[in-house]
Image: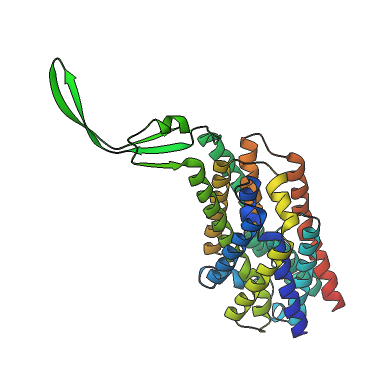
Amino acid sequence: MEFLLIGIALFLSFGNGANDNFKGFATVWGSETLSYRSALMLATVATVAGSLASLFLAENLVQQFSGKGLLPDVIVSTPHFILSIGIGATITVIMATRVGLPISTTHALIGGLIGAGLASNPSEVQFAKLWNTFMLPLLFSPIAAAMLGFIAYRLLRLQPTTNDCACVLPAELILVSESGVATLQFSAPRLVINNDKACNMQMRAGARFSITHLLDQLHILSAGLICFARGVNDTPKLAALLIAAHLLDVRVSIMLIAIVMALGGLMFARHVAETMSQRVTRMEHTQGVVANLITAALVLSASKLGLPVSTTHVSVGSIAGVGAGSQSLNWNTLRNILWSWVATLPMAAGIAWIALKLI
């Protein structure tokens, strides 16, 4: 039973990596800032870093996803209960990944908790805690992300610009003649933003750089921050399967899951990456940066507060919000994603219920 439980936990981590690892870089690949291979490698490195950082930043999530408080400890600590949760979540995530739908591992784990709890002892399930601790953050976070993305687009008018060159003109002394009197005036350093042709005429420019290149770097940095935040948020939830069964300690569990999660993303992230990057909406650099920063800020804040939000939900919400603001959102793709979210919890719950009864 112990080896089977470890195998299921690692298989779920593998599926989680395949479904989730690339999501932070969806806007980067979609805007053709990086190739798929380069984006995938950076996403993997940032995710592993976040997984290791979760040892210090997200200790509360381990306790929540072990089922403590939702059901009596005597139930949640049994290997067959934890195994049923893992089976329900694993099958759900793997099936969604195969068809390229970006679902939430968090959502699948909650479904597994509910299904296993109902199969074990329905009267002991604390539905009030389930709603307040798990469901409210999951429902509120994508709505908040979408609203922030929409508002940010409308306020900042994130449109592409032909003014790609920025020049810094140094300070200088200028001889000015007024009414026959010559005086020296001091000119402070100035930043001039214009097109390449105008910048080429600025012979005194002390420094010159490309705004597009700067936005590309900021875009990549914000994408890495999302993957880091996802590693912080998701790794403790997966580690809880091993920790609750007293199979491995926290450090070993998190390190093992980080490795397997990275492998899953490297091998099978392509299908979900195409959905997130190319089918929801097309983004310019500035739009992608704003969507990424909203996602990273919300997920990192939730992780620190112990709120089990889904990086998938938040990321899709922010991308959809910016896409709606720019009127470039693919509503059919978004509708399919939303239906997959609706189906995730009952599907995982049903599989976990069946698994516990069979075990």
Give the residue at the far right of this rendering.
358
Q: Position of residue 54 (x, y in %)?
A: 55, 69
Q: Is residue 229 left or right of residue 114?
A: left
Asked whether the viewer can see residue 51, the reply is yes
Q: Is residue 28 left or right of residue 117?
A: left
Give the residue at x 73% y 66%. 15
Task: Say which quadrant the C terminus sits in.
Answer: bottom right
Q: Position of residue 140 (x, y in %)?
A: 62, 51
Q: Position of residue 203 (x, y in %)?
A: 35, 34
Asked whether the viewer can see residue 137, the reply is no
Quadrant of the rendered image containing residue 354: bottom right
Give the residue at x 79% y 71%. 87
Q: Nearer the viewer, residue 235 or 281?
A: 281
Give the residue at x 58% y 45%. 288
Give the residue at the far left of this rendering.
181
Quadrant of the rendered image containing residue 108: bottom right
Q: Nearer the viewer, residue 291 or 148?
A: 291
Q: Is residue 236 above or below residue 152?
A: below
Give the residue at x 77% y 68%. 90
Q: Nearer the viewer, residue 192 or 70?
A: 192
Q: Is residue 266 above or below residue 293?
A: below
Task: Say which quadrant the N terminus sits in.
Answer: bottom right
Q: Position of residue 271 (x, y in %)?
A: 76, 55
Q: Is residue 206 left or right of residue 29?
A: left
Q: Is residue 81 left or right of residue 66?
A: right
Quadrant of the rendered image containing residue 55: bottom right
